[in-house]
């Protein structure tokens, strides 16, 4: 299922995107396949360890998707202000990436109630 999703996304994005953006199309397909794999693995682990209720998991998942969308919009807007040379591209990656992280964390708190500590907490003790 994951592989089919990844290949499907690669095919669709390579049709829609410019020829020069084939690497991005492949990356999107890879990311989609990994996302499906993570969801399937998460569901399996949740069942094995009697994890949190589906409602909470779903709220976090939907909040994460919304936060990722908000971060993508901000990163796109920030990177569009940079030039095309190597130094500008490197700067755009750093600045847009940092802006994306900040927006993601803030949006996830607003959309799913998960703060920065919840993103890095490990184990039952949270630390």
Image (cartoon, rainbow, N blue to C red):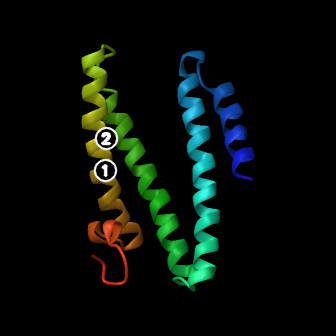
x and y, in percent, of residue 38 in the image: 57, 59
Q: Identify the residue at image location x=60%, y=47%.
A: 32
Residue in the foreground of this view, choosing between 71 and 45: 45
Q: Residue at x 29, y 60 (%)?
A: 106
Q: Nearer the viewer, residue 69 or 40?
A: 40
Q: Which part of the image, by quadrant, shows the C terminus?
A: bottom left
Secondary structure under tag 2 reads: helix
> Tag 2: Cα neighbours inside 10 Å, few (<14), some, or many (≥20)?
some
For this rendering, which residue is in front, 30 or 17?
30
From what the image shows, is residue 46 above or below residue 50?
above
Q: Residue at x 58, y 68 (%)?
A: 42
Q: Which mark is residue 113?
A: none
* Above-or-below relation of 56 to 6: below
Question: In the orientation shown, which residue stands out farthest toward the top?
Answer: 85
- For the point 60% across and 63% down, the residue is 39
Q: Which residue in the structure is indicated by mark 2?
A: 97
In the displayed structure, 102 sits above or below 91; it is: below
Task: Label 1: state its secondary structure.
Answer: helix
Horizontal and vertical percent position of residue 51: 53, 82
Q: Quadrant of residue 19?
A: top right
- Residue for badge 1: 101
Count the numbered circles shown: 2
Q: Is residue 61 left or right of residue 124?
A: right
Q: Are marks 2 and 1 in contact (CB under 8 Å)?
A: yes
Q: Position of residue 77 (x, y in %)?
A: 34, 35
Spatial distance from mark 2 to mark 1, Cα to Cα?
6 Å
Which percent across, then down, holds residue 4? 75, 45
Q: Pointer 1: residues within 10 angstroms few (<14), some, or many (20+)?
A: some
Residue 13 figure quarter: top right
42 left or right of 125 in image: right
In the rendered image, which quarter is residue 26 located in? Answer: top right
């Amino acid at each position: 299922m994951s592989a089919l999703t990844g290949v499907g996304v690669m095919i669709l994005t390579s049709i829609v995107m410019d020829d020069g953006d084939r690497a991005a199309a492949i990356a999107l397909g890879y990311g989609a396949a990994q996302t499906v794999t993570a969801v399937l693995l998460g569901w399996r682990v949740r069942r094995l360890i009697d994890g949190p209720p589906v409602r909470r998991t779903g709220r976090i998942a939907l909040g994460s998707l919304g936060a990722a969308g908000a971060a993508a919009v901000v990163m796109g807007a920030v990177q569009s202000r940079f030039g095309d040379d190597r130094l500008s591209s490197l700067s755009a990656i750093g600045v847009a990436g940092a802006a994306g992280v900040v927006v993601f964390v803030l949006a996830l708190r607003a959309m799913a109630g998960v703060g920065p500590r919840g993103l890095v907490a490990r184990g039952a003790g949270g630390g």
